[in-house]
Image (spheres, rainbow, N blue to C red):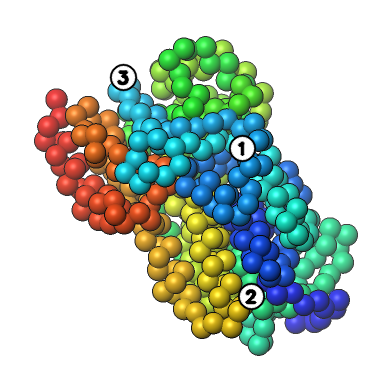
Amino acid sequence: MPIAEMERRQVVVIGAGPSGAIAAALLKRQGHDVLVVERQLFPRFSIGESLLSHCLDFVEEAGMLDAVNAAGFQMKNGAAFAWGDRCSHFDFGDTFSNGKPTTFQVERASFDKLLADQAALQGVEIRYQEEIIAVDFDAAKPTLRARRADGSLYSVEADFVLDASGYGRVLPRFLDLEAPSSFPVRHAVFTHIEDRIDDPRFDRLKILITTHPVHRDVWFWLIPFSNGRCSLGVVGAVEKIKDKPADFDACLRAFIAEAPELERLLHAAVWDTPARTIEGYSANVKSLHGKGFALLGNAAEFLDPVFSSGVTIAMRSASMAAAVLKRQLQGETVDWESEFAVPLKRGVDTFRAYVEGWYDGSFQDVIFHPGSSPEIRRMISSILAGYAWDEGNPFVSEPKRRLRMIAQICASSAP
């Protein structure tokens, strides 16, 4: 690789989103030299706005909780599910894992900038509008080639690189780590609106997940913000989307018109933001780590937005990677597979089991069953709150078997 303007850093983090900001802050707090390279300029739009309670454990660990608490984000205390005239509510203050009882629903542009700014206040150097254009991991230490906003180039050699580039998936692209996802291709069409919801029964403290009245594998999210606006989206497989209008706004409105309760709830909404789409968003990789690098959050794997697990997995991976890397930088021998990849995947696989159960209908049968025991609901609520690594929870330690068992019980006792 041609070298010009070479500099040397201890750790380079690619991406200043939640996983990058958390990892960088944690490493800086441990006394390490950290550089963050971010392709975009913050604030910038992103979805994934409904945080899980477990997220705040890592925000707190990184010394950012006071700032997040003071930012005026919409408080969230649980999740609500609706399907026709059926509804079900889960309270994060009543979980098996006894985690944090509340979290937030955030506009990611301001939330992500807040976390990055907090990392910078702790001494992390963040370079915005700089893009990694080449990498070399064959030498003794990894080297990254970066391009600034003005087009000038420089290279940086690091002891270790953490890829927190999210959907950009920088290292998976450069190092041929991309792997097919086990999920079918689905599309999300979404926007932000001024919701003007006037139904007194509507709970702004919860995300609302609505199942399509006919197609159970099509669902809607409604995430209220503190400013009277909300994030609104629909998710469906390709064949369910293709028959709708090509225009994204018309497509989303056509789907809303097929969900009477959701349409009623949004009858006075002001649709003032052009809708967007993400297509085929599920992703996977061959390995979460390699010589001189580890992958965090969506740079490694993204499952599905249905349970808002993306930011939680991202922050959890950041915390775990920072802990392992701290020991490595101090001269200890570490095993990234057994100390990072394997335990991280346990929680990801728990989420995966319930995402699969959502789309095949079995988890929906459990959620909407009127006779679920309080203890089972507490175990499920723990997972919905993000505590997918709490193996004391039977629905975590044996997710597929437990879900199959309780789904069969619910099906046999259905009215």
As rendered, which of 318 and 26 lies closer to the eye?
26
Seen in the image, is 174 located left or right of residue 243? right
User: What is the CA distance from the residue labelled 1 to the residue labelled 3?
Assistant: 35 Å
The residue labelled by disc 3 is: 85
| Mark 3 crowd level (few <14, some 14–19, many ≥20, 10 Å Cα) | few
The residue at the point 86 percent across, 63 percent down is 151
Q: Earlier in the sequence, mark 1 or mark 3?
A: 1
Q: Which quadrant would residue 161 be assigned to in this image?
A: bottom right
Q: Would you place residue 247 above or below residue 401 in this image?
A: above
The residue labelled by disc 2 is: 160
As rendered, which of 9 and 152 lies closer to the eye?
9
Element under disc 2: strand
| Mark 1 crowd level (few <14, some 14–19, many ≥20, 10 Å Cα) | some
Please name which of the two marks, 2 or 1, marks the residue nearer to the observer: 1
The disc at residue 69 is 1
Q: Which quadrant would residue 296 be assigned to in this image?
A: bottom right
CB atoms of marks 2 and 3 within 8 Å: no
Q: Quadrant of the N terminus?
A: bottom right
Q: Return the x and y of residue 164 as percentages of the image width and height.
A: 61, 60
